[in-house]
Amino acid sequence: MSDPEFKMDDGWRPFDPNPSRPQFVVPEGAVDAHCHVFGPGDRFPYAATRKYTPCDAPKEKLRELRRHLGFARNVIVQASCHGTDNRALVNALKTSGGLERGVAVVARDISDAELEAMHTAGVRAVRFNFVKRLVDVVPKEALMEVAERIKSLGWHIVIYFEPQDLPELYDFFTVLPTTVVIDHMGRPDVTEDPGGDEFDLFLKLLRDNENFWSKVSCPDRLSASGPPDYDDVVPFAKRVVETIPERVIWGTDWPHPNLKSHMPDDGKLVDLIPKIAVTAELQRKLLVDNPMRLYWPEQGEIV
Ligand code: 0GY
């Protein structure tokens, strides 16, 4: 029996139980590099500090989706509803046969032994979330302390922010001491010009700092024109792919937390990939070479 405390918020949509099979065939070894596992809440309780209660989205369902879409591996990102309790994430990684890697959220007082145990399980990064509707502010000194500690494990940092906050955060970001991966292209306002000032600042961050990567993900979250084509997001994503082809990765964002307007068909999200990465070479970098280099470097060059 589920704990009623962990009942999905009213007005929330669960993930699509029957996504279409994509027409675009992803290259062999493709990585879905941004997705989540949620709960189940009765086994892995959601955090008391959470700003939303999602639908349960357990690892078994994620793996079904991976097979259905034709992907080989997943990178699971700790979402705010689980706070700094990474047990659901770590449980997934440990039972994945090496096919899942993780991005954790940790507090500054985490012990070295806990970090090492997470590394053994498959965690390779921490996430710093600056989206105010999702998390309470964490002081920058605390984040920098975590950054220095995870650096020695060879981990990187994933950052999530909204574009209006980039000018204020820019200088802090550029002194982070590791590779930095930006979630969802810094969430551009896609009703603006992709050649405009706001997106230019984001592209400058990527161009001027070779340690910065971007996920070209979440058309469903960013689009004003809506499904299934999400046409307004395509020029933004294409521009990022063509600006830094060696430093982009892609993910479904399953099970799409906090989407109020609609629930995307994950198969259709995959069908957008050839519109944003328009050659087989770009697709291979985006889906295989780049995420493998970042999350499974020990596998070496994939031929
Ligand atoms: C995402 C996006 C969101 C949620 C979270 O940590 C989270 O709760 O990341 C969002 O609401 O924009 O990346 O899944």
Image: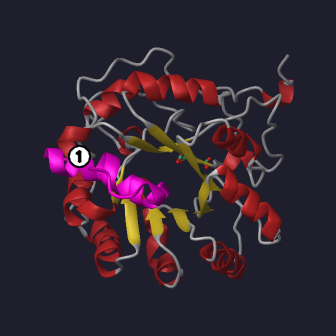
What x and y, as percent, mark residue 213? 38, 65
Instruction: Please name the residue that numbered disc 1 is placed on.
Output: 283
- Tell me which corner region of the image, top left, top right, bottom left or bottom right, holds residue 185: bottom left
- Tell me which corner region of the image, top left, top right, bottom left or bottom right, holds residue 84: bottom right
What x and y, as percent, mark residue 209? 36, 79
What x and y, as percent, mark residue 147? 63, 76
Residue at x 63%, y 31% (from the top left corner):
59
Residue at x 23%, y 29% (from the top left corner):
24
Outermost residue, left side: 279
Q: Is residue 184 magenta?
A: no
Q: Is residue 280 magenta?
A: yes
Residue at x 29%, y 70% (from the top left corner):
203
| Figure quadrant of the N terminus | top right
Question: Would you say the magenta stretch is mainly helix, strand or loop?
Answer: helix
175 displayed left or right of 48: left
Highlighted magenta segment, given as a residue range: 277-303
What x and y, as percent, mark residue 234? 23, 46
User: Given the image, on which type of amino acid does mark 1 rest?
Assistant: Gln
